[in-house]
Image: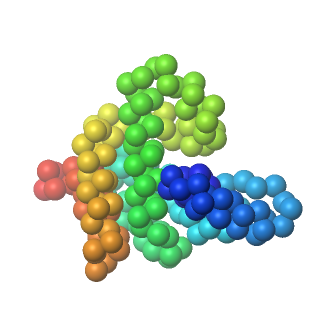
Amino acid sequence: LIAFLGDGSFRDTLGILQKVLSGAGGRTIDRATVERITGAPPLTIVSELFSALIEQNIDHCYTALRRAEEHNVDVATLIKLLLQAVRLTLMYRYSPSAREEIAASYGEQYTELITRGAVEGTKSITSQSIISLITALERVSYAAIPTLPLELACIEITGTEALT
């Protein structure tokens, strides 16, 4: 998560690591500690939103987005984490040789979520989902309502408008 938040910059990653090390006060550093210190979206919110997309349940998407707003989550970071989850899900689904690496690189809870997306989310978690999320990420910095581009992506991914 620290490397992810560094967004490819060695200096930014090092700065985040130093911030986490000083904030952890000698305790073991786990994902929850990093989330708390950096303000990164909690895995519970990412999981809740990703599960709602898998289930194609727009109501649950809105519930997760409200929780994200309550936690003052940076929407761009949330979208990036969702992009990572969708990408890993597609890799898990289409590249059996990548499955062991995914399982070894990510925690058990996250790997279970990815596996669930690969198996149950065949209608919603697609390459088109990545395009929808990239579009949301591009538009989030210009949106008057920060969650609006992600809300629109959720509507597209869940196929909500097609159902009405």
Q: Position of residue 41 (x, y in %)?
A: 53, 63
The residue positioned 45% from the left and 37% from the top of the image is: 88
Query: Which quadrant holds residue 117?
Result: top left
Q: Is residue 63 above or below residue 89?
A: below
Residue sitting nearer the eye, 119 or 81: 81
Q: Quadrant of residue 108?
A: top right
Tell me if I can see residue 69 in this picture.
Answer: yes
**Which quadrant would residue 60 be assigned to in this image?**
bottom left
In this image, 75 relative to 155: left or right? right
For the image shown, how many numbered marks are present on the structure?
0
* Nearer to us in this view, 119 or 126: 126
Q: Is 110 on the left or on the right of 49, as rendered?
A: right
Residue 126 pos. (x, y %): 29, 38
Q: Position of residue 6 (x, y in %)?
A: 55, 58
Q: Is residue 100 above or below residue 86?
A: above
Specify the quadrant that holds the C terminus.
bottom left
